[in-house]
Image (cartoon, rainbow, N blue to C red):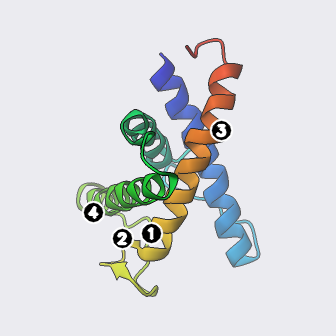
């Protein structure tokens, strides 16, 4: 029950962050639209659950190593998700081909750093706060 609830919570938060980022860049409303018209992005829910599952094993590492392990893990997850989406659903949901340090346009070096930082925010601040707020959380 906890995993399912957190999956939906983090999928919605991820959609909101992605929509804010896209809208800021486009200077107009630009919602993430993987599952139109729902305000949800499952890739963020799966990514958050992945980080929460890995967190106990990397928590004892120095924070800079934790940052890079999370960033590398999520960049690999983003790469695999991009290939999966294109091969299974015949949809390319993002393309970083124009960015330096990219990998076939599915991920890039900049996002490795973004994912590492967001994973630390998730494990150090957001999840502890939300886990204590919801009655379904242990």
Who is closer to the viewer here, 129 or 98? 129
Numbered circle sitting on residue 126? 3
- Compute the Cα span from label 3 to label 4: 29 Å
Image mark count: 4
Q: Residue at coordinates 50% horizontally, 67% vertically from top-left? A: 113
Circle 4: is it few (<14), some (14-19), or many (20+) Cα within 10 Å? some
Q: Secondary structure at mark 4?
A: helix
- Residue 87 percent coordinates (x, y): 23, 61
The answer to the question of whether label 1 and label 4 lie on touching residues, with beta carbons closer than 8 A, is: no
Name the residue beneath numbered marker 1: 94
Tell me if residue 37 can be seen: no
Q: Residue at coordinates 61% horizontally, 40% vertically from top-left? A: 124
Q: Secondary structure at mark 1?
A: loop
- Compute the Cα span from label 1 to label 4: 10 Å
- Residue 78 percent coordinates (x, y): 38, 59
Q: Secondary structure at mark 2?
A: loop
The answer to the question of whether label 3 and label 2 lie on touching residues, with beta carbons closer than 8 A, is: no
- Compute the Cα span from label 3 to label 1: 26 Å
82 vs 123, left or right, is left
Residue 69 placement: quadrant: bottom left
Name the residue beneath numbered marker 2: 106
First of labels 4, 2 by sequence position? 4
Numbered circle sitting on residue 83? 4
User: Which mark is nearer the camera, 3 or 1?
Assistant: 3
- Compute the Cα span from label 1 to label 2: 7 Å
User: Which mark is nearer the camera, 3 or 4?
Assistant: 3
């Amino acid at each position: 029950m906890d995993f399912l609830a957190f999956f939906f919570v983090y999928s919605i938060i991820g959609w909101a962050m992605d929509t804010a980022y896209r809208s800021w860049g486009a200077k107009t409303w630009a919602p993430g639209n993987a599952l139109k018209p729902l305000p949800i992005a499952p890739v963020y829910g799966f990514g958050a659950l992945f980080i929460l599952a890995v967190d106990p094993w990397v928590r004892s590492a120095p924070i800079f190593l934790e940052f890079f392990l999370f960033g590398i893990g999520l960049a690999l997850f983003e790469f695999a998700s991009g290939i999966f989406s294109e091969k299974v659903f015949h949809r390319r949901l993002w393309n970083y081909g124009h960015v330096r340090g990219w990998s076939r346009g599915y991920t890039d070096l900049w996002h490795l750093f973004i994912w590492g930082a967001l994973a630390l925010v998730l494990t150090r601040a957001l999840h502890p706060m939300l886990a204590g707020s919801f009655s379904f959380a242990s």
